[in-house]
Amino acid sequence: MHIDSVTVDHSAAVGPINRRLFGAFVEHGGRSVYDGLYEPGHPLADDDGFRTDVLDLVRELGVTTVRYPGGNFVSGYRWEDGIGPRDKRPRRLELAWHSVETNQIGVDEFATWCRRAGVELMMAVNLGTRGIQEALDLLEYTNHPAGTTLSDQRVANGAATPHGVRMWCLGNEMDGPWQIGHLSADDYGKLAARTAAAMKMFDPGLELVACGSSWTGMPTFGDWERTVLEHSFEWVDYISCHAYYQERQQDLGSLLASSMDMQLFIDTAKATADHVRNKRRSKKTINISFDEWNIWYIDEHAGAERDPQAWPTAPRIIEDVYTVADAVTVGSLLITLLKNCDRVTSASLAQLVNVIAPIMTEPQGPSWRQTTFFPFATTARLARGTAYRPSITTTTYETERHGDADHIDSVITYAEEDAAGAVFLINRDQLNARTITVDLRAFAASTVTEAIVLADENHHAANTLADPERVAPRVLKAANVEDGRLTAVLPPVCWAAIAFH
Ligand code: AHR
């Protein structure tokens, strides 16, 4: 039996946890919107065609913001197609996901859905096939109260109150050759700067996100961020990071240590933003919007789902089925986001419904929670107040992709006003249970109020339509506090959350 220890004191405080850390992402692609959150005619659909069972699950998941409408989709999107009477909206070829976009959902309907879900709408503008004018038009349409052609058009379309979108992404993954209208860092940096400057003439309080690298494997990684920020530093507020992980060739150890790559990404984005700031002798801090992150079995999908002759509507694409090990990794990625919450002040799990998603639906049928739903929902619920980066004594193991990885990782959160905190833990050991002691004397912890573990003897167990409740978190027995010290036993390959008072 291995004994690992986690120790925390007040000097380990990272910063306040921004609720935007628990955001998600909805893209027009596959069955995310159509036959996902929107299915008129489903027995549980409301008057607007939104599935109420999905809305319930989104609320249970604890999502705070939703980035919309893409993703790769946004780089070919004409937002005007999605407003006004539905029967007049064009059907268009959608190149990013090789399908037909019916435009039955547009910005007004999606803003209504966000209100119903209780989430903040965060939008992306198209800087692939379009530019400054279209971004400004969309901004005026969504955010100006009334009295101009565009704002009055929104009012006439039934949205008397402006949608009040604060956070805007300046395009999507413009460093990627797969992106419609892909640009060099230099060209994108200039376009992002000019678009941002113009958008801030409308409202200087907007929060604007410049595209960072699409993943750490991009050949331009690091240089891209520097060049983009050198052009746009004055006008933007965030640099984005995107990261997807998968278990390759049954290398479970590397999957479980994916957060090491996420940490490298955050460190690089932060250092680069600070380098650009210091060169300018500026006091402004550029924060990180980690606005796409998840597990994605992208290698399995490559080319397999696309018939070049077919242009389907809402095809079943990239509907990954997540395992327990994937969920443990998602829990670990959340630990890393929390450990960096002084600079990562916004993040979006990609995506939300059906497409690489924690929530799945069947047309005319049920909806269910994937394994990854559980660590997200519990972390969003329990991680309150301030995050603390504890010091951890543990052993390491070798991984193929990330070098040596710690068996145990952890973050602690504490909300002073409620005298309530939580310890989030991951055990990456594939063979052994680990006894953990967590020194919580700094918070005078006296009681465990809740202890949850996600683990399974079969690390690849999953929830499916046929067996939607195969995997669920269970109570972590024998987690207790004595003299401010918590002890618990973590089974192999698990994610756990222990709340204390
Ligand atoms: O989330 C799926 C896709 O991943 C998004 O459209 C794109 O931004 C990223 O490459």
Image: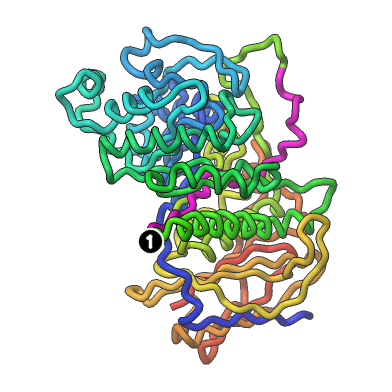
Q: Quadrant of ligand 1?
A: top right
**Does the stretch in magenta take in 288?**
yes
| Residue for point 77% across, 34% down | 300
Query: Where residue 455 sits in the image (x, y, percent)?
Result: 69, 60
Nearest the eye: 421 or 298: 298
Q: Quadrant of the C terminus?
A: bottom left
Left or right: 252 as drawn, with respect to 468: right
Query: Where residue 427 sits in the image (x, y, percent)?
Result: 70, 67
Is residue 185 in view? yes
Left or right: 293 as drawn, with respect to 457: left
Left or right: 309 as drawn, with respect to 190: right
- State whether residue 408 is above or below residue 480: above
Q: Quadrant of the N terminus?
A: bottom right
| Residue for point 75% across, 72% down | 433
| Residue for point 39% across, 34% down | 194
Query: Where residue 403 sits in the image (x, y, percent)?
Result: 79, 62
Residue at label 1?
Answer: 283
Which span is picked out in magenta? 283-306
Crowding at label 1, few (<14), some or many (≥20) Cα neighbours within 10 Å? few
